[in-house]
Image (cartoon, rainbow, N blue to C red):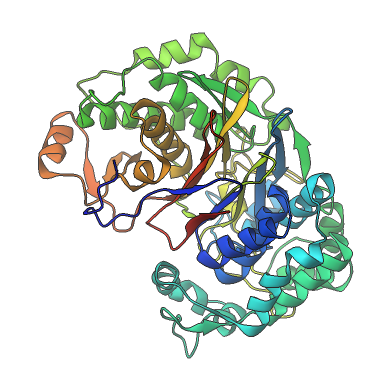
């Protein structure tokens, strides 16, 4: 029973269709498409286009996209829309540019050739039903006429103002007299509206060929990058369909996109935790401790082994094998924290996630990202494209699986999820928050599966995250619980901002009723028909 004195909202219920996003205008745009007879893919694309306009710190057409498509009847499909390094991105070239240990997020070398538009167009071609011109109408309107900035977005925007001031184009587009917009302020992106209109008419070539591609390449080369028009041309069809990877947690089959995404890491955490009782009678301190220990083990392997799938054959089978999981699980001491694993990935937390289920029972789990807030902080003034910073994930040593190389895809943190029971789609879900996503998915799923919480209640529970040798906790963790975790050897730190965000839609297997949630740490909502 929901506690209405908690000041938390309950889950959303609907009979026919539902969309859940981190922004109310995006949720409304997706629902509008569903109400007009569009399918789940149509609604997800409409919502994502709106988010690229109204959530510019979190996402954009200059970023990446991953999708899991789960038809009511048929196999789950995975779409990889991650960008690749340009042909000139060799270690020698980067060393000559003065980069030795890492690639700074604001460096032009951190910009991979964006994969999102390639993915959107392939997804639409494969499963869309309404024309892109119709799907992008709301986004184009908001870009041209303006949209009100929401409270959480205003907070994030203000924290990134210093970054935006470093790039004249970014400052002109996203700051007013050097200041980030506050809640309720109207912001416009007319150049982005032009790009969306062109993509709706001409598909990927409007972005990867012609004057737009030439302008983007020229801008990036002008600030020291190696990107060329040929790199953009070669990327027009870089998105591709592939088979998802999966593992069982209790009686539920969990699907993820394969590497170069970190979905493999989420499955490792779940498989490790599957050997422990995390039910409602298990003490909260025990659940947090076990989750932290499984996270450290899985992330240590993520950072050392995951990269472009072409460079890591057999990795999924090895890391999800019974032998590997049992070995890792045996390393967990239920009473003591492990020594911290070595973390060397850059911190990142800015992404949008969309969950949709349509009237036919098809589900789409969709995630789009620039990597860091406002990506690289670089904006092409002539096209209005905000460039991603995904290339900062690359390593600068030739012997690492995630070493930068021409045409290579870096380790990518954005991971949509699908869950099935008895061969039927049961839930579409995702967690935002960069590194936290894999750990967050495991926590969300355990809350729903082990403790029978509804999606909104599972999202609203206080979060913890074992990261960079510390156990981050949200302020809602009680003093007594903090003392227990400290006694086990965890180094606690209170997170300065909410940990992650999430959306999920659960399909009741008997009635077909949809139950959805949208994280209260963000501005969005789950709404349905």
Residue lying at 75% horizontally and 53% vertically, measured from the top left: 120
Residue lying at 67% horizontally and 70% vertically, measured from the top left: 139
Can you tell which quarter of the image residue 487 is in? top left
Of residues 120 and 160, which is closer to you in this image?
A: 120
Q: Is residue 113 visible?
A: no
Compared to 295, does 333 lie above or below?
above
Compared to 311, does 314 lie above or below?
above
Q: Is residue 528 visible?
A: yes
Question: In the rendered image, which quarter contains the N terminus?
Answer: top left
Compared to 152, does 467 lie above or below?
above
Can you tell which quarter of the image residue 420 is in? top right
On the picture, is 208 further left or further right than 434?
A: right
- The number of callouts visible is 0
Of residues 458 and 397, which is closer to you in this image?
A: 458
Q: Please provide percent x and percent y for residue 186.
A: 52, 84
Residue lying at 57% horizontally and 36% vertically, measured from the top left: 512
On the picture, is 452 further left or further right than 380?
A: left
Q: Please provide percent x and percent y for residue 455.
A: 42, 42
Of residues 354 and 328, which is closer to you in this image?
A: 354
Q: Please provide percent x and percent y for residue 250.
A: 45, 18
Compared to 434, does 70 lie above or below?
above
Name of the residue lying farthest toward the top? 323
Q: Please provide percent x and percent y for residue 67.
A: 66, 43
Residue lying at 45% horizontally and 81% vertically, measured from the top left: 181
């Amino acid at each position: 029973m929901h506690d209405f004195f908690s000041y938390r909202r309950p889950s959303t219920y609907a009979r026919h269709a539902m969309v859940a996003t981190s922004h109310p205008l995006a949720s409304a745009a997706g629902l509008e498409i569903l109400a007009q007879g569009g399918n789940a893919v149509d609604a997800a694309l409409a919502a994502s286009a709106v988010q690229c306009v109204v959530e510019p710190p979190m996402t954009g057409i200059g970023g990446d996209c991953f999708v899991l498509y789960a038809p009511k009847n048929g196999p789950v499909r995975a779409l990889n829309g991650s960008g690749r390094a340009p042909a000139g991105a060799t270690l020698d070239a980067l060393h000559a540019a003065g980069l030795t240990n890492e690639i700074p997020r604001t460096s032009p070398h951190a910009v991979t050739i964006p994969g999102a538009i390639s993915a959107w167009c392939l997804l639409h071609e494969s499963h869309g039903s309404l024309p892109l011109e119709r799907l992008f109408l709301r986004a184009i309107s908001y870009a041209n006429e303006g949209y009100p900035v929401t409270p959480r977005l205003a907070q994030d925007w203000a924290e990134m103002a210093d970054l935006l001031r470093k790039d004249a184009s970014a400052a002109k587009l996203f700051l007013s007299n050097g200041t980030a917009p506050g809640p309720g302020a109207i912001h416009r992106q007319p150049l982005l509206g032009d790009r969306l209109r062109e993509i709706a008419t001409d598909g990927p070539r409007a972005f990867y060929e012609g004057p737009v591609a030439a302008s983007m390449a020229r801008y990036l080369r002008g600030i020291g990058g190696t990107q060329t028009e040929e790199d953009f041309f070669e990327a027009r069809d870089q998105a591709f369909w592939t088979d998802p990877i999966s593992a069982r947690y209790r009686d539920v089959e969990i699907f993820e996109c394969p590497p170069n995404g970190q979905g493999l890491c989420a499955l490792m955490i779940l498989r490790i935790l599957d050997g422990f009782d995390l039910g409602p009678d298990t003490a909260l301190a025990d659940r947090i401790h076990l989750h932290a220990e499984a996270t450290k083990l899985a992330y240590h392997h993520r950072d050392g082994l995951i990269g472009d799938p072409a460079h890591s054959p057999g990795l999924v089978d090895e890391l999800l094998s019974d032998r590997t999981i049992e070995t890792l699980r045996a390393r967990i001491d239920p009473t003591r924290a492990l020594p911290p694993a070595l973390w060397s990935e850059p911190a990142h937390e800015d992404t949008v996630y969309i969950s949709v289920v349509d009237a036919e029972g098809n589900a789409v789990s969709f995630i789009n990202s620039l990597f860091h807030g406002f990506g690289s902080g670089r904006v092409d003034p002539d096209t209005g494209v905000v460039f991603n910073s995904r290339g900062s994930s690359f390593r600068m040593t030739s012997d690492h699986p995630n070493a930068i190389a021409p045409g290579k895809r870096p380790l990518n943190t954005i991971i949509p999820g699908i869950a099935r029971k008895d061969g039927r789609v049961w839930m579409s879900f995702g967690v935002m928050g960069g590194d936290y996503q894999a750990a967050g998915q495991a926590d969300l799923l355990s809350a729903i599966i082990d403790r029978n919480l509804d999606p909104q209640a599972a999202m609203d529970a206080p979060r913890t995250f074992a990261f960079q040798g510390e156990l981050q906790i949200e302020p809602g963790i009680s003093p007594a619980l903090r003392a227990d975790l400290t006694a086990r050897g965890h180094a606690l730190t209170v997170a300065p901002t909410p940990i992650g965000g999430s959306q999920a839609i659960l399909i009741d297997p008997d009635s077909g009723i949809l139950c959805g949630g949208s994280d209260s740490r963000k501005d969005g909502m789950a709404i349905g028909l």
